[in-house]
């Protein structure tokens, strides 16, 4: 009921509420299974996968998420691809949108713990850091490959997101920045800005975005959301370069 309420505040139909609850419930077992495997099979704590270090690094990931979305919105609006306007939601709906951030925090952090926390580090320990970085990005893309509305551009973007998040983990030495990015990216993209999130809709948003006639799916992202946009890819390439430089510099400094 606590989870269902915030979803209902912005969703025009019950199916969106059910989808939100299902999304939340589907990622809780990821945490449980990961903890159990580490505890009983590998005899090490959950924190060993990167849940140590400065929690303030969350802010780095959050800042990157808002930066990419800001560029997306400005470029899409300025080039006549998408029209954004206020949905007219009231205070109760806004409170619901804020509450949805908790749902995306559970979902996003679970993906980061499993992919960048366990998978990348396990592969890196055996075959080297570059193998771990590439492997997790490929797996991350494959996991999203059957989502609704996926395109070659979208799939390439998801792999690029994987590389970016992997570099973020390597640079900071923990998962906090990646978790902050993942949660806020999905939340701001969907319930706030009205994009689909990896092809999944949530039934309502604070801002409504409408593609303008003649707009390009490769620029707007189409039904996959901003993650399917070439605008996003261009920003990702720049950020990947910056994070790669920051990581290599941190290695030299230590």
Image (cartoon, rainbow, N blue to C red):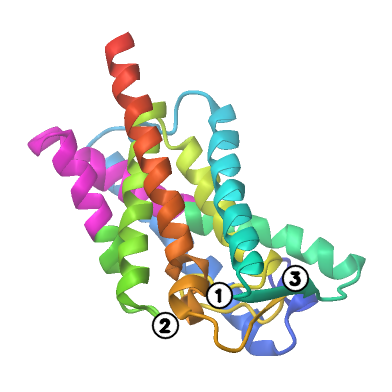
CA neighbours of label 1 inside 10 A, class few (<14), some (14 to 19), many (20+) = many
Please, which residue is most extreme toward the front here?
79
* Percent position of residue 134, x then y: 20, 48
Q: Which image quarter: residue 82?
A: bottom right
* Percent position of residue 74, x then y: 65, 59
CA neighbours of label 2 inside 10 A, class few (<14), some (14 to 19), many (20+) = some
Using the image as rendered, state which of residue 49 and residue 45 is in the foreground: 49
Magenta span dominant secondary structure: helix
Q: Name the residue under label 3.
A: 207
58 magenta-colored = no
Region rendered in magenta = 109-138
Can see residue 59?
Answer: yes
Circle 3 SS class: strand
The N terminus - image quarter: bottom right
Circle 2 SS class: loop
* Percent position of residue 128, x then y: 12, 34
Structural distance between the alpha carbons of marks 3 and 1: 12 Å
Q: Do the residues labelled 2 and 1 touch (CB within 8 Å)?
A: yes
What label sits on residue 149 in the rendered view? 2
The residue at the point 73 percent across, 59 percent down is 99
């Amino acid at each position: 009921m606590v989870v269902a309420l915030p979803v209902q505040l912005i969703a025009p139909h019950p199916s969106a509420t059910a989808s939100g609850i299902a999304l939340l419930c589907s990622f809780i077992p990821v945490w449980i299974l990961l903890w159990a495997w580490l505890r009983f099979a590998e005899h090490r704590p959950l924190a060993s996968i990167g849940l140590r270090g400065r929690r303030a690094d969350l802010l780095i990931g959050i800042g990157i998420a808002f930066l990419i979305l800001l560029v997306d919105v400005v470029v899409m609006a300025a080039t006549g691809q998408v029209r954004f306007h206020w949905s007219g939601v009231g205070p109760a709906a806004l409170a619901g949108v804020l509450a949805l951030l908790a749902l995306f925090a559970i979902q996003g952090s679970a993906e980061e713990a499993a992919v960048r926390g366990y998978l990348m580090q396990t592969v890196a320990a055996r075959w080297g850091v570059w193998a771990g970085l590439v492997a997790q990005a490929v797996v991350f893309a494959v996991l999203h490959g059957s989502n609704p509305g996926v395109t070659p551009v979208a799939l390439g973007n998801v792999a690029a997101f994987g590389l970016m998040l992997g570099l973020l983990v390597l640079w900071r030495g923990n998962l906090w920045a990646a978790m902050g990015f993942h949660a806020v990216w999905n939340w701001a993209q969907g319930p706030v800005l009205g994009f689909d999130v990896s092809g999944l809709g949530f039934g309502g948003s604070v801002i409504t975005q409408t593609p303008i006639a003649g707009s390009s799916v490769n620029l707007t992202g189409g039904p996959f959301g901003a993650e399917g946009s070439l605008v996003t890819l261009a920003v990702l390439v720049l950020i990947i370069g910056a994070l790669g430089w920051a990581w290599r510099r941190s290695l030299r400094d230590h």
